[in-house]
Amino acid sequence: MHDTHVSQALSSGDAVQEVGMEDDPAAVARVVGARIRTRRTERGMRLKDLAEAAGLKQPFLSQLERGLASPSMHSLYRLARALDVTPGDLMPPAESVPGARVVRASEGRRVESTDSTAAFVRLIVSDGQHPFELSEIEVDESRNNHEWFENPNAAATYVIEGRLDVEVEPPYQTYTLGAGDSIFYPQNARSRWTALGQKPTRLLHVVARPRQV
């Protein structure tokens, strides 16, 4: 994707729908930064306010907004919660099409974090047309979720392959999942994942979008 297209997208706020953008992490980072900044200013929040609400350092958030860094899965979820949106709302939007839509294995919006130990994430459905967002996530011993996810909306995780320990609160409980197992989280639950074994654990994570009033 050419920089002229990226500039046009940033100047218009959000609208980035060119096919193949997922193959250009730098372009995605610039658009993600613009969307974070747009939603922050819409809410009248200062950079410091959002950094504190999301539990991030202000210099890092400044880099994110300028497209000089890419958020990890944890940072993306923290920012989404602080801004009262879903993670997909901070990613370049997928093109809206009528009827059924197929997303091939090579498609979707990839979250390419500047943190080399961050989990691999591919947002599969995040176009705003559906009442949920669907992500493919891969974790292993070096890319585990050592931080708690706070889920303001109902969510679910399905293990495609591998094994996973899932800590959930409240109340605090640990569940061990294998391939084909699922776990459903109620609204406002916190969760943390740990991949088990030496092979990567692949899973699908579904997040319900907030209801529009």
Image: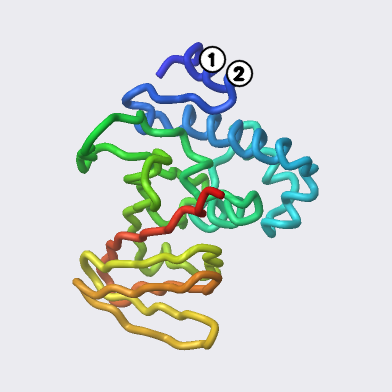
**Residue drawn 35% across the image and 30% down it:** 96
Few, some or many residues within 10 Å of mark 1 (<14, 14–19, 20+): few
For the N terminus, give its image quadrant.
Answer: top left
Q: Which residue is mark 2?
A: 11
The image shows residue 89, relative to residue 200, as above or below, that is: above
Please give the count of numbered marks on the rendered protein: 2
The image shows residue 210, relative to residue 170, as above or below, that is: above
- List x then y, in percent, for residue 113: 49, 46
State how far apart marks 1 and 2 are (Cα).
5 Å
Which residue is situated farthest in the front direction here? 213
The image shows residue 3, relative to residue 70, as above or below, that is: above
- List x then y, in percent, for residue 4: 50, 11
- List x then y, in percent, for residue 11: 60, 18
Colour setup of the view = rainbow
* Label ID, residue 118: none
Asked which quadrant contains residue 37, the reply is top right
Few, some or many residues within 10 Å of mark 2 (<14, 14–19, 20+): few
**Residue drawn 75% across the image and 48% down it:** 58
45 sits to left or right of 55: right
Q: Which residue is mark 1?
A: 8
Label 1: element kind: helix
Report the amino acid beneath label 1: Gln
Q: Nearer the viewer, residue 100 or 121?
A: 100
**Residue drawn 40% across the image and 78% down it:** 166
Q: Pointers 1 and 2 in contact (CB under 8 A)?
A: yes
50 sits to left or right of 182: right
**Residue drawn 37% across the image and 73% down it:** 184
Report the amino acid beneath label 2: Ser
The image shows residue 152, relative to residue 20, as above or below, that is: below
